[in-house]
Image (cartoon, rainbow, N blue to C red):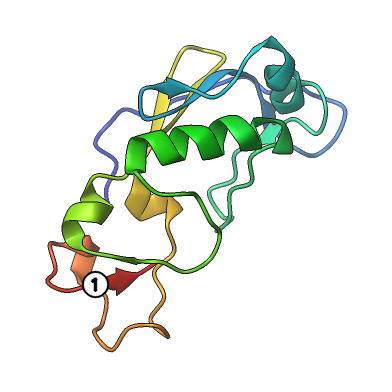
Amino acid sequence: MFHLEQMQFISSISDTDSMYRVGILDVHLGNMLLTNEYTLRTFNDMKGTIIDSGTSDTFLPETIASSFEGSWAILTGFQYSNAWRSYTFKEFDSLPDLIITLSNGYKWHIEPKYYMEYSQFHDSESQPDNLDPWTGHLTF
């Protein structure tokens, strides 16, 4: 996958250790705001938010769990779960983007194909290249 946008730069909010923490202004799931003044502190003040291109997992603070789960149910029509789930292409294609607004105003759109993990162990079919439209169900 190639980047289609210009490289974005942002200042670190901490210069006291080796972690490069960045400031977050808000977080949306699709068009639904997940953060408020209190929950933003968990992104910015506590452990902070670290964006690491070499990491395969993304963790969100527990303080937005209920707003995430409620928004997920409204936007997708089903309850959020960390368990494997099978999707048709139409279902998967309608999943919402996670949008993180960094302190410089840049809105980082994370598409479902980047936050969902395909499970080759649960499907008899192999994953389509770049998640091109598929028939039947794939498990994520």
Q: Would you call the spot at circle 1 few (<14 residues within 10 Å), some (14-19), or many (20 or more)?
A: some
Percent of width and height locating residue 113: 33, 54
Please tell me whether residue 27 is drawn above or below residue 105 in the rendered image.
below
**50 relative position to 14: left or right:** left
Residue 45 falls left or right of residue 70: right
Q: Which residue is mark 1?
A: 137
At 15% from the left and 62% from the top, the residue drawn is 132
Q: How many marks?
A: 1
Q: Residue at x 20, y 69 (%)?
A: 129
The quarter of the rendered structure image containing the C terminus is bottom left
Is residue 12 positioned above or below 60 on the image? above
Locate residue 128: give its quadrant. bottom left
Instruction: Please state the horizontal and vertical placement of residue 134, each as a whole percent of the image.
Output: 14, 68
Could you tell me if residue 96 is visible in this image?
no
Quarter location, residue 64? top right
Tell me if I can see residue 135 in this picture: yes
Q: Position of residue 21 (x, y in %)?
A: 70, 30
Q: Amino acid at mark 1?
A: His
Identify the residue shown where x is 43% and y is 40%: 73
Residue 41 in the image: state x and y as whole percent: 75, 19
Helix, strand, or loop for circle 1? Answer: loop
The one of 21 and 32 positioned closer to us in this rendering: 32
